[in-house]
Amino acid sequence: MDAKRRLASPVLWVGLLLAALLLRMDVFQPLLRRGFPGVEPVVYNRDSFLALFLSQLGLVASASLAASLVGVALAVFVTRPAGHDFRAMVDALATVGQTFPPAAVLAIAVPMVGFGARPTVIALFLYGLLPIIENAIAGLEAVPQSVREAAEGMGLSARQRLYRVDLPLAAPVILAGIRVSVTIAIGTATIGSTVGALTLGTPIFDGLVANKLPFVLEGAVLVALFAILTDLLFARLERWLQPAAG
Amino acid sequence: MIEIDRVSKSYGERRVVDRLSLTIGAGELCVLLGSSGCGKSTTLRMINRLIPTDAGSIRVGGEDVTSLPAEALRRRIGYAIQSIGLFPHWTVEDNIATVPRLLKWREAQVRDRVGELLELFRLDPPIYRGKYPHQLSGGEQQRVGVARALAADPELLLMDEPFAAVDPITRDALQSELANIHRATGKTIVFVTHDIEEALRLATRIAIMERGRIVQLGTPLDILEHPANDFVRDFVGHHGLGLKLLSVRKIADRLRRGETADGEPLALDASLGEALSAMTARHTDRLPVCDADGHEVGVIVLADLVR
């Protein structure tokens, strides 16, 4: 029963497919040649897909980790009595971060920090902050008043209330925000290739510039699988957290 | 045990507690009774400093409540509220163990204490320890809430309308459990309610509050027999006053010693209301009475109820 359930899991199949394509895209060479006659080479070969994937993973992971830490910390701050007055300002800042197109952030960041990974991480960080802050605030505010009052009345200190009550109860909602943020970041990271970051967007942009459609297709399929796999993993993490929250 | 001395609290222009003084002795079950907005909950919450006072002082066990950190104070005072506030992500055991663990009890001791409390509230420990709050009925949740408040064996227990949100049958059961626990443990309890019947049933003393002040302080019988003013008279209610009096007077006060009667005996500490109820149901005007050991000590007669 358990083995069967594991076999039926989409995480396994999407993961295997992504791994197979990252390592052995050349298997599809004959098929791609038939689909796009006259394009040579038909499989992107300037960098290995695995290297591109790992580089993008690193960019997304560092930007999302930073956005999660900063976002949750800001949400905690504005939902405490001391930070209450800053609530509107943090909301506004996060919204501005989201409204700014990542391409514009790249354009501004490049002259300041140079080409490559750094402007990409900055853009992803700013772009990913809003869903995390908004969900974290919503999750922390959804902790029932009765629970908060009981915790205070029994003598939990402010720090104990935060770590033992507020954050665990808000965790599913906070995680949902991080899930949205990371999934968006994976897609958005591809434009980092326009400023010299190595991502799975690199074959896409090279393909567009050199009019080689198979490159675009290869990059796009890999990015999509990457995003889907990540989303599935987060869904699993959320389910794992759920029973504890009742 | 508690000395409240000319305490005031205002929100903006509105004075919700107005130079209130009240002394509650050890082992009392003092009910703060009044309609909503009379300041009874605010008074209660100033005792464990959930609400700071504007003026006046509160001493618990001789110590001013502001003389130690709020958290340390609250860990010494049990607190149960209407909305219960069980931690939904913790099991019943973890909920009850909250304060003992904050006080760093040994884990074996915590486990024993949780088992003891679950048994006290007739919740079978092997079944209930591992349950989550959402798996419990309203009455069970409130039992766990009160058990949690009692967990670290506090001298003082504050209860804010703890039974207001449960159905009448469950409320009745919870009230008699609380009365038993109060009798058995001798804890000092401050109990807030707007329900006059509940107050008459549980209180050793009732403080009736109106607009932030105590308008009358006395035993349930005092308040029914000698209401201090029209407000108290209205609040207590003319309607059914006789039955309320019967419910607070004890059989012991009207006992005819030495006489005998047939039938299932009533307990000496039962109320005259219970005696009337038993007589009505059994179509009789005299019933035997026994003491706590089960020995018959006399009879109670219908005519004596209205004396």
Image: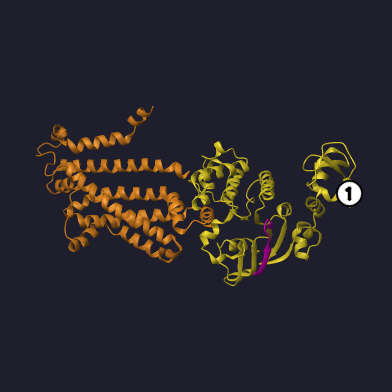
Above-or-below relation of A35 to A245: above
Q: Is residue B243 magenta?
A: no
Spot the orange chain and give its letter.
A
Is A87 left, or right, of A109 in this rendering? right
Q: What is the x, y in percent for residue A133?
A: 37, 56
Can you tell which chain is drawn yellow?
Answer: B
Who is closer to the viewer here, B113 or A237?
A: B113
Q: Residues within 10 Å of mark 1 (few under 14, many from 20)?
A: some
Q: Nearer the viewer, residue B212 or A95?
A: B212
**Residue stretch rendered in magenta on the structure:** B18-30
Q: Residue, x 74% and y 54% (percent of image)?
A: B200
Three-letter amino acid code of the residue under disc 1: Asp
Q: Quadrant of the N terminus of chain B?
A: bottom right
Nearer to the camera, B103 or B29: B103
The colour mode here is by chain
In the picture, residue A50 is in which quadrant?
Answer: top left
Q: Position of residue A146 (x, y in %)?
A: 54, 54
Q: Position of residue B62 (x, y in %)?
A: 62, 64
* Any part of residue B137 in sight: no
**Is A160 situated above or below A4?**
below
Q: Residue B57: where, in percent of width, then height?
A: 60, 69
